[in-house]
Amino acid sequence: MDTDKIKIVGVGEGGVRAVAKMIAEGVGRRKNVDFVAVGKDENILLTSATKNNIFLNRDAPTIYKRISANLRDAKVVIIVAGLGGSAAVGALPRIISFAKNNNAATIAFANLPFILEGVERKKKAEYSLNCLRDVDTAFIIPTEKFFLFRLYQKEISVGELFDVANEIFSMGVKIFLDMTADKNEPLKLGEAAFGYGFGATALEAMKNAVKFPSLDTDELSRATKIFVRVTGGNDTPAKNFIKKIIPPDAKLSWHVDNAHGEKILASIVFSKKEV
Ligand SMILES: Nc1nc2c(ncn2[C@@H]2O[C@H](COP(=O)(O)OP(=O)(O)OP(=O)(O)O)[C@@H](O)[C@H]2O)c(=O)[nH]1
Ligand SMILES: [Mg+2]
């Protein structure tokens, strides 16, 4: 049995949409990556183009057996979800425990509902957020911040905002996969965050990564473990720049990967609070 699989599990409509974006961006062409979609809206699952659609209906025990069978060969389980939905409330704790029982590493990419979505969603999100305490690494993307950030720039619909969020999730997963590929074990970072930026030089790309709207520079300045990846250029100025921001005793992992591309990409992943 192949036990090296990385399973990316989209939970709920939001999670499945984010996974669909990842598929469109070619994440599925990477070695060992497989997708699973868990949700109750059949149409959305169909558009996700995953091979393993699991339709959540009333027959929960059968469904959970299927999810568990599906995750059996996974070494890493990456959960992607919009918190605040009912699919996450039901499925998140189970997916996490299936993965843990198989000794798979558990990673989550999630977002909290917007305040304007109301108190019910907020309550559900708090419950799901609590479940995520058990994962090895959790990226909770502060979508509300994007919302404010974007609103100042132009009028944008909530649907468009979620498209932006899904793009960011997709990029976050790619960055995470690239970083774990450099190491043999998946990163265990507890509460974590990421940012990325492009530029003509490594320094410019790094400055843009630090300015990334969901990256909190105060948090970065207190980070304990930081992983940086730059796809070319002279990386010394970029390194000096980041070193001025992070604590002097922080553990910095630095990777230069001369990928071909018009622009240099700098990505930062860091631990806010280790578990
Ligand atoms: N990242 C992302 N989040 C989304 C998207 N659409 C909605 N969300 C968020 O995800 C949360 C959960 O909603 P859904 O994913 O629709 O939940 P569900 O479990 O499928 O079903 P309901 O609870 O019936 O809505 C919402 O409160 C939104 O904040 C999306 O396309 N991408
Ligand atoms: Mg919904």
Image (tube, rainbow, N blue to C red):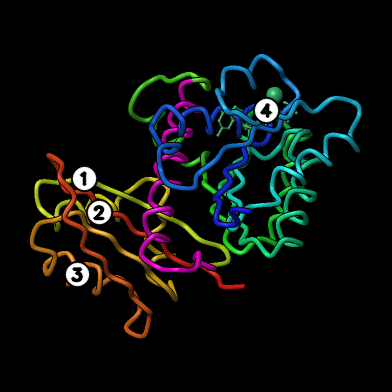
Residue, x 19% and y 51% (percent of image)? 205
Crowd around label 1: few <14 · some 14–19 · many ≥20 (10 Å): many
* The one of 28 and 126 positioned closer to us in this rendering: 28
Q: Is residue 205 left or right of residue 122?
A: left
**How far is the residue under mark 1 from the one under mark 2?**
6 Å
As drawn, the residue found furthest toward the front would be 1
> Looking at the rendered structure, which numbered label has been put on residue 266?
2
Q: Position of residue 122 (x, y in %)?
A: 72, 39
Residues tagged 1 and 2 counted as in contact (Cβ below 8 A) = yes
User: Is residue 170 within the magenta segment?
Assistant: yes
Q: Bounds of the magenta span?
A: 160-188
Where 39 falls versus 33 (above or below)? Answer: above
Q: Position of residue 259 (x, y in %)?
A: 18, 50
Query: At numbered mark 3, what does the secondary structure look like: helix, strand or loop?
Result: helix
- Amino acid type, residue under disc 1 in the picture: Phe
- Amino acid type, residue under disc 4 in the picture: Asn
Where does label 1 land, which residue? 198
N-terminal label among 3 and 2: 3
Between circles 3 and 4, the one closer to the viewer is 4
* The one of 240 and 29 positioned closer to us in this rendering: 29
Q: Position of residue 7 (x, y in %)?
A: 58, 46
- Amino acid type, residue under disc 2 in the picture: Ala
Q: Quadrant of the C terminus?
A: bottom right
**How far is the residue under mark 4 from the one under mark 1?**
35 Å
Where does label 3 land, which residue? 239
Q: Tell whether circle 1 marks a residue whose Cβ is less than 8 angstroms from ligand 1.
A: no
> Looking at the rendered structure, which numbered label has been put on residue 53?
4
**How far is the residue under mark 4 from the one under mark 2?**
34 Å
N-terminal label among 4 and 1: 4
